[in-house]
Image: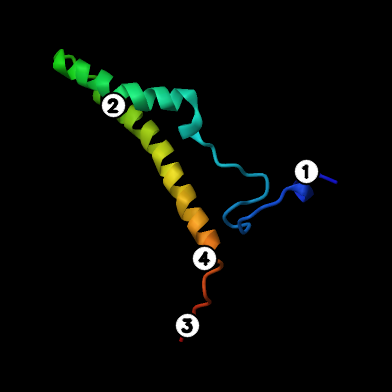
Amino acid sequence: MSAARTRQSHAPPFIDPPGYGRHRPERTLLYQLVEQHYPAFRELRNAAERPLPDFVQREFDAYLKCGRAGAEQSQRELALVARGPPAQVRLL
């Protein structure tokens, strides 16, 4: 029996397509280190009047937002699955 058939999904296919697994940057050591130390590093650079270039700050902020947004998205997906399929809407 193939791995696809033995896979048990708790979510509908439109939320959890077969073979897809969301990347979870918030679980990586790199993400945790950046999340923990980047704010203090940024403040130290600002206090020394040598702020990080804007593009560097944007990249770090986007990286951290990616992990947070992914965790929030996972929570929304779980809530949708728990509620079940949406009611059918009748168009007049």
Q: How many neighbours does mark 1 have within 10 angstroms: few (below 14), some (14-19), or many (20 or more)?
A: few
Of labels 1 and 4, earlier in sequence is 1
The residue tagged 2 is 57
Going by the numbered disc 2, the residue's amino acid type is: Gln
Residue 26 image point, x, y percent? 46, 33
Of labels 1 and 2, earlier in sequence is 1
| Secondary structure of the residue carrying numbered label 1 | helix
Q: How many neighbours does mark 3 have within 10 angstroms: few (below 14), some (14-19), or many (20 or more)?
A: few
Going by the numbered disc 1, the residue's amino acid type is: Ala
| Secondary structure of the residue carrying numbered label 4 | helix
The structure residue drawn at horizontal position 21% and vertical position 16%, both measured from the top left corner, is 45
Q: Which mark is residue 83?
A: 4
The residue tagged 1 is 3
Residue 92 image point, x, y percent? 46, 87
Of labels 3 and 4, earlier in sequence is 4
The mark lying in front, picked from 1 and 4, is: 4
The answer to which quarter of the image holds residue 2 is top right
Check whether the beta carbons of the residues at disc 3 and disc 4 lie within 8 A of each other.
no
Residue 89 image point, x, y percent? 49, 78
The residue tagged 3 is 91
Of labels 1 and 3, earlier in sequence is 1
Determine whether 73 is above or below 43 in the image.
Answer: below
Q: CA distance from mark 2 to mark 3?
A: 47 Å
Q: CA distance from mark 1 to mark 3?
A: 41 Å
Q: Which mark is residue 92?
A: none
